[in-house]
Amino acid sequence: MSQSLTGQTLLQPAQVEHAARLLGRAFQDDPLMAYISPSEVRRRRKLPAFFRVAIRYCLRYGTVYTTEELDGVACCLPPGQTEPSVSRLLRIVLSGTLWLPGPLELRRALHATTYTDKTHASTAPGPHWYLWVLGVEPEKQGRGTGGRLLETVIQQAREQEVPCYLETENPRNVPFYQKHGFRLVREVAIPKSDVRIYALLREPDK
């Protein structure tokens, strides 16, 4: 569909670069991103390319929502496609997204992904929608944009009567998701880091 019940629209391929820069700014101070890439300057330069991979992956295998103002982005994967595969990710990278992590970034990204993947698999083992990324332009945060995008993803899960799963590494985000009906199911520490995974699940409405 071209537009959701809550007024959000599907991201178009021509908007990928704008969306990637937006998510780079939104996640500049995210604990997981800071762990993977400790240099603030390098994060500012590299995060757009990192998120370009996620956006293009979801455009191909899932759904990417944005707003008419292009001030928020939600990348999600449908039931049966909720485990991003290495081969598909490599295909996206090799197609020209040009995210080239340094040795430290690659090692830390793989280390963190091991724990996020295990947490995901154990928390939501059945069919579900996976909200992989949700970000709002920093100066637009707190105005309801994130909530409207989130409700669009929830609506997809509601229509199929399956749960919606997400994880965040920022504890400040947990109350926001709980306000929208998500339940904090698990909290997992990533060893050798100060990062914790907060796994949240929203059961289908009765």
Image: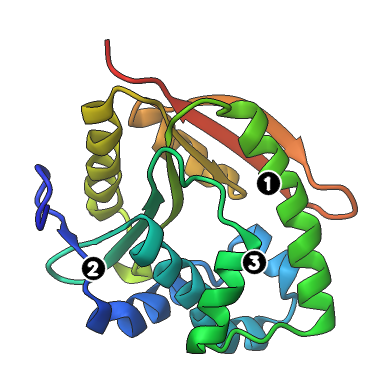
Residue at 59% x, 35% y: name it: 199
Residue at 40% x, 20% y: name it: 203
Label 1 sits on what residue type?
Answer: Thr
Which comes sooner in the sequence, label 2 or label 1?
Answer: 2
Q: Secondary structure at mark 3?
A: helix
In the drawing, does residue 159 fall left or right of residue 100?
left
Q: Residue furthest right?
A: 192
Q: Which is more toward the observer, 138 or 6?
A: 6
Cβ–Cβ under 8 Å for marks 1 and 3? no
In the drawing, does residue 56 fall left or right of residue 84?
left
- Residue picked out by circle 2: 11
Q: CA distance from mark 2 to mark 1?
A: 26 Å
Q: Which is more toward the observer, 12 or 185?
A: 12
- Residue picked out by circle 3: 33
Cβ–Cβ under 8 Å for marks 2 and 3? no
Please tell me how crowded label 2 is: few (under 14), some (14-19), or many (20+) other residues with Cα within 10 Å.
Answer: many
In the drawing, does residue 29 fall left or right of residue 4?
right
Q: CA distance from mark 1 to mark 3?
A: 13 Å
Cβ–Cβ under 8 Å for marks 2 and 1? no
Label 2 sits on what residue type?
Answer: Leu
Which comes sooner in the sequence, label 2 or label 3?
Answer: 2
Residue 174 x/y as whole percent: 50, 37
Residue 117 x/y as whole percent: 67, 45
Q: Is residue 180 visible?
A: yes
Which comes sooner in the sequence, label 1 or label 3?
Answer: 3
Label 3 sits on what residue type?
Answer: Met
Residue at 9% x, 54% y: name it: 3
Q: CA distance from mark 2 to mark 3?
A: 24 Å
Q: Which is more toward the observer, 85 or 192?
A: 85
